[in-house]
Image (tube, rainbow, N blue to C red):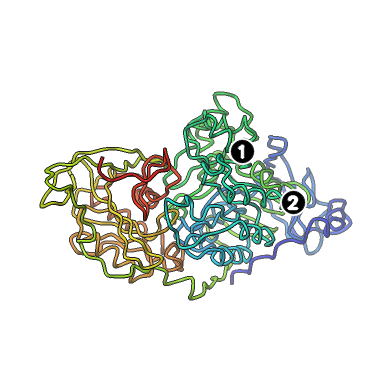
Amino acid sequence: MPQRPAPKPRPWSEMATELVDVATGRRPADLVVRNGRWVNVHSGEIVEGTDIAVVGGRFAYCGPDASHAVGEGTEVIDAGGRYLVPGLCDAHMHVESGMVTVTEFCRAVIPHGTTSMFIDPHEIANVLGLPGVRLMHDEALAMPVNVHVQMPSCVPSAPGLENAGAQLTVADVEEAMTWENIVGLGEVMNFPGVAANDPVMAGEIAATMRAGRTVGGHYASPDLGLPFHGYVAGGPEDDHEGTRAGDAIARVRQGMKAMLRLGSAWYDVAEQVKAVTESGVDPRNFILCTDDSHSGTLVNEGHMDRVVRHAIAQGLKPVTAIQMATLNTAQHFRLEREIGSIAPGRQADFLIVSDLPGMTIDAVYARGRLLAEKGRLAIDIPAYPYPPEAKNTVNLGKRLSAQDFDIEAPSGANEVRVRVIGVIENQAPTRALEADLPVEDGLVAMDRANDVCQIALVERHRGTGGVTNAFVSGFGYQEDCAIASSVAHDSHHIIVVGTNKQDMALAANRLAETGGGVVLFSKGRELALVEMPVAGLMSDERAEVVAEKAGRLVEAMRRMGCTLNNAYMQHSLLALVVIPELRISDVGLVDVRTFERVEVFV
């Protein structure tokens, strides 16, 4: 029978005398691991022949011989010369992108060595507001690993350019800063607002600073001139939106932490890590994260172990890459006395690793308890029930028809020039493209031969029946099809992309029936469906079940002609009106270079 997870250790201040007694041999440890190679992220070295002793979920002794800490009730493990690695930390991520709840996310990533996560639940905040944040905050507290929460800062992400299902205020941020598990302010996406001294952005940042918490950043612009300097001066302390080595260098020089992300669709580590490997910038201010990983990636490829492996493959020393996923993160969030290293007093979160460059994880311990072994959970994590009010959030206001996706051409036109959202492989930004499209019976037609199909955003929070129509390129669909998703960062209306308007209507209507998720139709047939009834963002099924359904979705998209890596993740970000260049929202097309609404027709 799997054992229940251990509670969070008592504070170091309350345990200091016990730790001293174990370290000096006056009382036995709960656990001793012998004959390990200590990956010491403080000194940047690997120390051979190390023993560690644990009591009450904290490290008490790390040294050459812990035999003095072994007593009658002590569990003794022989590491057999394998590496002792601190539990891995994900410095910036959104649980909702995994399509699962916090509980299921933990079940998926613990076997991959993740023992601390810093989550920004701004997806559920855009649907359910502050109560939604509280739901995930409380679920996080019930986990057997550290799931720290950052209070969402931008709901909606771009006021005036979109309407979300909720709105957060400075007062909401002030309240959240009093909650037990809030460690900071989530990514401040309204970077023009910070640079312009928007009172809401300035107020939220000030409230976070007064509480002594970390301010998360999101500067999604290549402009490193005065707007960038204004943003840094406004208070954000990190940024994960860089894509170039120069982006990382610029942020570190300004005192920020450069967060390098490898998610399911964001491959930003390889270029930016050159700041360290080629330019020699000090790695202590670089942090690894995932940002967005869907369930298929988590179950089949890994989590932070995948990111560390990738960083090592780019030329980082293994210890340096591990520092970027442990100690650097802990220091950034002012938690280095709790997590991020194997050292006395810290929580006993560690991995036993047989191959360091390959991050082959044989066992995962958190709070001194074995959680996973050889890729399988060794504990039971009970399901966390979400209340009925967190479900049934998809309200279209009417049943949609193919005509709702018509785009009428200017009177008398035989051809029109239109703006097109251009998807970029493996990156969050899009391109602002233009295309000449034919007009048929007064309606603008798609151009499948040149990979221009339709995109629509369907309002789903207030039942207005509103549909915004435009064009997108980059998915490569060759068949009659449509994919609809109620995950549409960050306002989370429904995004529909298709080559056939009948299928577009069927797909959107199907999500109203299921309470949310992602679905693919072709020629009137449903080919794949991932139900996500919790706020229209998360499934309440097991992660491996969701991963299997997501795999069928990806395969169906490929059969339709889509060759993009992780196309669903690209699809879900097409409404994110804080990342350049061109996006769609419920108010129309948005040029994020100027933060202005623009027309479909040029």
Vertical placement of residue 14 versus 445, above or below: below
Q: Position of residue 95 (x, y in %)?
A: 51, 57
Instruction: Find disc 1 in the rendering and name its residue.
Output: 257
Q: Nearer the viewer, residue 174 or 538?
A: 174
Identify which residue is drawn at 56% across, 71% down: 382
Count of numbered labels shown in the rendering: 2
Quadrant for the N terminus, please: bottom right
Instruction: Find disc 2 in the rendering and name its residue.
Output: 346
Give the mark toward the camera: 1 or 2: 1
First in sequence, mark 1 or 2: give its number.
1
Q: Secondary structure at mark 2?
A: loop
Q: Position of residue 508 (x, y in %)?
A: 30, 63
Q: Position of residue 276 (x, y in %)?
A: 57, 28
In contact (CB < 8 Å): disc 1 and disc 2 = no
Q: Residues within 10 Å of mark 2 (few under 14, many from 20)?
A: many
Determine the CA span between mark 1 and mark 2. 23 Å
Q: Residues within 10 Å of mark 1 (few under 14, many from 20)?
A: many
Q: Is residue 545 left or right of residue 217?
A: left
